[in-house]
Amino acid sequence: MGRQARGLATKAQIISGAAEAFDRNGYVGTSLEAIVESIGLSKGALYFHFGSKEELARAIIAEQHAISIAAVEAIRGEHAPAVEQIVMLCHEMARQIVHEPIVRAGIRITVELSDKGYGPADPYIDWINTCEYLARRAIDQGDISHETDPATFARFVIGAFTGVQTLSLIHTGGADLEERVDDMWMLLLPGIMPRYRHKDLRRTRNARSVGPPGQFGPVFSL
């Protein structure tokens, strides 16, 4: 392995190990010393790639963002009605939160930094913008009522999902998140779909991406 490849592999190792540490203990509760100890590298190796804990944390958020963008682009390419793609997006977000430490860590760091007034909003903005785009398409396709404002709907859906996933992580460690997302859509869909589309409620609520599980895992866009 060449020097550059080794450097990229080491950087990816640091990001993965740090994500697990931040996921367990949060941004404030994790020290660089604890990260170094957990990944088995020297402090010098870590500082070669990241000058501070904040720089490392933002690299994890950037990786989370890359994972989210990959999922968004893939789901938008699905051959399915737009309203089903919105449901797919929520379930893929749920899968990432349950199975991807980098995603959980990125979200936790974002929340902690936001409490301090300088947390990045990119992943949430991308989710909201994608949801708004799909909502506009779903309205054109007749699957969402024309009385629905797409921007308001998108902010509400991502906000509702955020609340659902937070409660699930607190109560069951995310074990029931898939079921709670289904509950969310069971309550929302009858109110936004025109009555003549209600025959499609069950199919819409059960919509899932056809891609293999984990296809949107860590991409290490370093």
Image: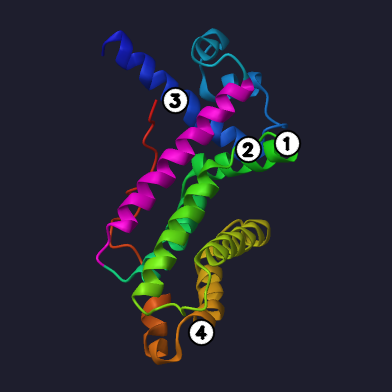
* Tag nearer the camera, 2 or 3: 2
Q: Mark 1 sits on what residue?
A: 117
Mark 3: give few (<14), some (14-19) or many (20+) Cα within 10 Å: some
Q: Against 117, is 216 above or below?
A: below
Asked if the residue at tag 3 contacts the one at tag 2, i.e. Cβ–Cβ closer than 8 Å, the answer is no
Q: Mark 2 sits on what residue?
A: 109
Q: Amino acid at mark 3?
A: Gln
* Tag nearer the camera, 4 or 3: 4
Q: Against 75, is 69 above or below?
A: above
Report the side of 196 relative to 179 (left or right).
left
Q: What segment carries the magenta color? A: 53-79
Q: Amino acid at mark 2?
A: Ile
The label number, if any, that marks residue 13 in the structure image = 3
Dot 3 or dot 1, earlier in sequence: 3
Asked if residue 75 lies in the magenta stretch, the reply is yes
Q: Amino acid at mark 4?
A: Pro
Residue 217, quarter of the rendered image: top left
Label 1, secondary structure: give it: loop
Q: Against 209, is 139 above or below?
A: below
Dot 4 or dot 3, earlier in sequence: 3
Dot 1 or dot 4, earlier in sequence: 1
Distance from disc 2 to disc 4, alpha carbons, whole Å, reads 35 Å
Q: Residue 214's x, y, as percent?
A: 36, 50
* Tag nearer the camera, 1 or 2: 1
Q: Residue 150's x, y, as percent?
A: 50, 66
